[in-house]
Amino acid sequence: MTDQDATPDVFFQNVVVTANTLATTITDFDNGYEGQTLLVDINDANTTIAFSGANFSGNGSVDLVAAAGDHLNCVLSGGVWFCQVGLV
């Protein structure tokens, strides 16, 4: 993923890795396709996933302030990324 991109492009990717150098809240993934599965590996302590917004479902609708080593398994359905969170 591009550093500090709030809506990273995941076009035909199945695994993406964060490497944000400053605080970054991801609010959506660009160019996903219906049924796409995506593994998101968090590789920094600066990434937040906006589960309180409309584009992600999971984590009890509470934003995830991720730590290095956390990961998400997501699938795109009906324009929403449904994600299961794995914490270190």
Image: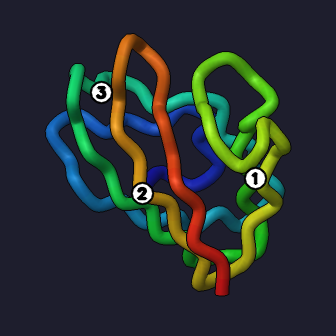
Q: Residue at x 71, y 67 (%)?
A: 21
Identify the mark nearer the N-term, 2 or 1: 1
Residue position marked by numbered label 2 in the rendering: 73
Q: Nearer the viewer, mark 2 or mark 3?
A: 2
Residue at the extreme top of the image, as rendered: 78
Residue 16, compared with residue 53, is above or below; it is below
Q: Which residue is mark 3?
A: 32
The image quadrant where one finds the C terminus is: bottom right
Query: Which sits earlier in the primary sequence, circle 2 or circle 3?
Result: 3
SS assignment at label 1: strand
Determine the CA span between mark 3 and mark 1: 19 Å
**Relative to residue 86, is residue 8 drawn left or right?**
left
**Residue type marked 2:** Asn
Horizontal arrangement in the rendering, residue 69 relative to residue 31 (left or right):
right
Between 62 and 48, the one lying in front of the other is 62
Q: Quadrant of residue 1?
A: bottom left
Percent of width and height locating residue 81: 47, 32
- The residue type indicated by label 3 comes to Gly
Res. 48 mark: 1
